[in-house]
Image (tube, helix red, strand yellow):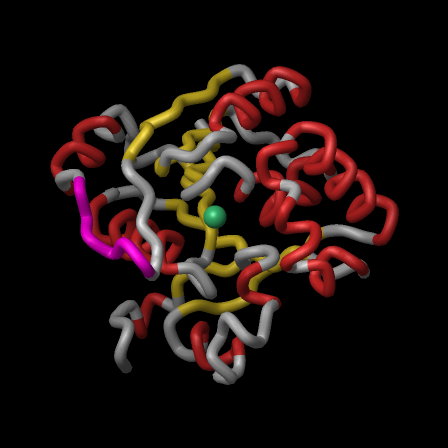
Amino acid sequence: MVIFIEPHCDDFILSAGMYFLQNNPVDKVITVFNSNGNEETKNLCKFLEIKDYMDLGMCNLDWKHPIILFTITEIKNRLSFIRKEDTILTVLGVGNVAHKFLVEFLINTLDVNNFIFFRDFPHSYDRMKLKEIDFAFYTKNRFKLVNKYGDNPCFKTKIDLFKKFYPTQHSLLWFEREQFSSFVEEEAFRYNLIHKNLWI
Ligand SMILES: [Zn+2]
């Protein structure tokens, strides 16, 4: 099975929408953290004929409320159906604290052969959110870029799907307007196995 694990309800379409639209199958989408829009991903999956959707409903993490109100064990149990031969797609974990937490959690918990990390859109493209550190710093040594997806029309389709299916997330269109205004490719990363550790 190919499973996309998204931190929040819009991350699959925003970070890997063009990957999917260009005929790369996804069998299941899982939303980990709770927000008003979880039903929206469910509806999107129905529209895109992705047969399986799962909502873990965990309390969200952010800079103001960084306390983890749920146990690691709970998420681990909910994801225990995942098998070594499944392909896990998720975000890269740059520019948002909940994304970062989820990626570290998945890397350290899941025993799967095939992991692909999609650069976080729009967060990782927002220089303010990177605190003036170059994006390359976050991937240096630890991850390597393996593929790029998308083109201009496909980007437009992705943004149109976001607008149509995610009314609760429309504030992003204002707060991240620079990122939404022109085409950027989606970037897929894999582990650089020699440098799995974050700090080397
Ligand atoms: Zn998110």
Asked whether 12 or 50 is in front, the reply is 12
Numbered marks: total: 0
Q: Is residue 157 left or right of residue 97?
A: right
x and y, in percent, of residue 89 in the image:
46, 43
Asked whether 171 or 196 is in front, the reply is 171
- Among the 4 quarters of the image, the one containing residue 85: top left
x and y, in percent, of residue 52 in the image:
48, 18
Asked whether 47 or 149 is in front, the reply is 47
In the image, residue 82 above or below residue 140: above
- Among the 4 quarters of the image, the one containing residue 49: top right
Residue 96 belongs to the span the image colors magenta: no
* Residue interval drawn in magenta: 64-69
x and y, in percent, of residue 128 in the image:
55, 75
Q: Residue at x 45, y 58 (%)?
A: 92
Q: Residue at x 65, y 37 (%)?
A: 20
In the image, residue 126 above or below residue 20: below
Q: Quadrant of the N terminus?
A: top left
Q: Is residue 140 left or right of residue 105?
A: right
Q: Residue at x 28, y 53 (%)?
A: 107
